[in-house]
Image: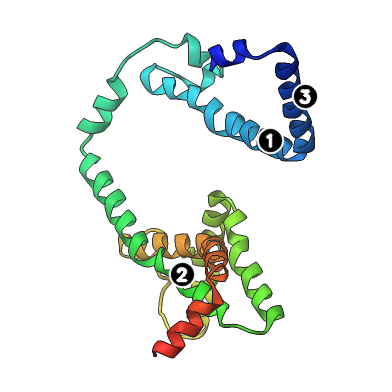
């Protein structure tokens, strides 16, 4: 490539540069969008990766950002402590089981909702359901935990108060403290938070299907 560029005559080289610059100016808005996306990835995805060194240092949060670079290097000390901890097996088990349960329940849920919404012909109702379902995606997990405490707490939870008021239970149920409710609560909160967002993505994929395929499927029975 370098040999070819050097063998070009000055007039041809300048002409190509002019064409390239003209094309760049014509597509400047597209380049601006790409540049903003790259800047976003640089600031929020790559820059924080410098913090990985904290795992290999005796870092204290009281030392601030400067401590990331000035703390003592301890190598794999923290990893050895984690692997040899008596709760390591339970932590790995819970992580794998939760991931498996989310694949079973959280993955099909948005697909099912997308198929159902695709059949809705009342556009106002369809937009309302989409809006309500994808809004939880923008809620922080900290806020989700706060909502769960407000609804499910044994002391002030609205659910327990309602069940007690209706006479369905004799004492508050420990939704947030009992291991028996942990799996269902963790999976259902993940489904509630992310189902609407993935539904929009699957709806976009469904809308891209050629209508002739539906007609062919009806003909084939």
Residue 174 visible? no
Find residue 101 and report its image quarter: bottom left
In the image, 54: left or right of 150?
left
Considering only vertical position in the picture, is 16 above or below 101? above
In front of the other: 186 or 44: 44
| Mark in front: 2 vs 3 | 3
Considering only vertical position in the picture, is 215 above or below 143? below
**Alpha-carbon span between mark 2 and mark 3:** 49 Å
Residue 8, horizontal then vertical, whole percent: 64, 14
Secondary element under disc 2, as helix, strand or loop, is helix
Q: Residue shown at 79%/32% (left/top)?
A: 25
Q: Which residue is mark 1?
A: 36
Q: Which residue is mark 3?
A: 18
Secondary element under disc 1, as helix, strand or loop, is helix
Query: How many neighbours does mark 1 have within 10 angstroms: few (below 14), some (14-19), or many (20 or more)?
Result: few
Secondary element under disc 3, as helix, strand or loop, is helix
Considering only vertical position in the picture, is 108 above or below 92? below
Q: Which mark is residue 213?
A: none
**Alpha-carbon span between mark 3 and mark 1:** 25 Å
In the image, 113: left or right of 86?
right
């Amino acid at each position: 490539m370098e040999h070819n560029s050097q063998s070009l005559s000055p007039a041809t080289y300048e002409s190509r540069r002019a064409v390239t610059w003209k094309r760049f100016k014509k597509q400047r808005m597209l380049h601006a969008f790409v540049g903003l996306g790259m800047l976003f990835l640089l600031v929020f995805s790559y820059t924080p990766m410098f913090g990985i060194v904290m795992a290999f240092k005796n870092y204290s949060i009281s030392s601030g950002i400067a401590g990331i670079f000035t703390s003592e290097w301890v190598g794999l000390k923290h990893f050895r402590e984690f692997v040899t901890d008596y709760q390591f097996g339970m932590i790995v088990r819970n992580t794998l089981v939760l991931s498996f349960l989310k694949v079973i329940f959280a993955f099909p849920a948005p697909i099912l909702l997308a198929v159902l919404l695709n059949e809705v012909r009342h556009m106002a109702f369809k937009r309302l359901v989409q809006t309500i379902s994808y809004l939880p995606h923008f809620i922080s997990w900290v806020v989700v935990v706060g909502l769960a405490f407000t609804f499910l707490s044994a002391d002030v939870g609205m659910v327990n108060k309602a069940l007690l008021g209706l006479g369905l239970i004799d004492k508050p149920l420990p939704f947030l403290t009992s291991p028996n409710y942990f799996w269902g609560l963790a999976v259902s909160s993940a489904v509630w938070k992310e189902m609407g967002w993935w539904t929009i993505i699957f709806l976009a994929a469904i809308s891209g299907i050629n209508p002739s395929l539906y007609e062919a499927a009806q003909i084939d029975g």
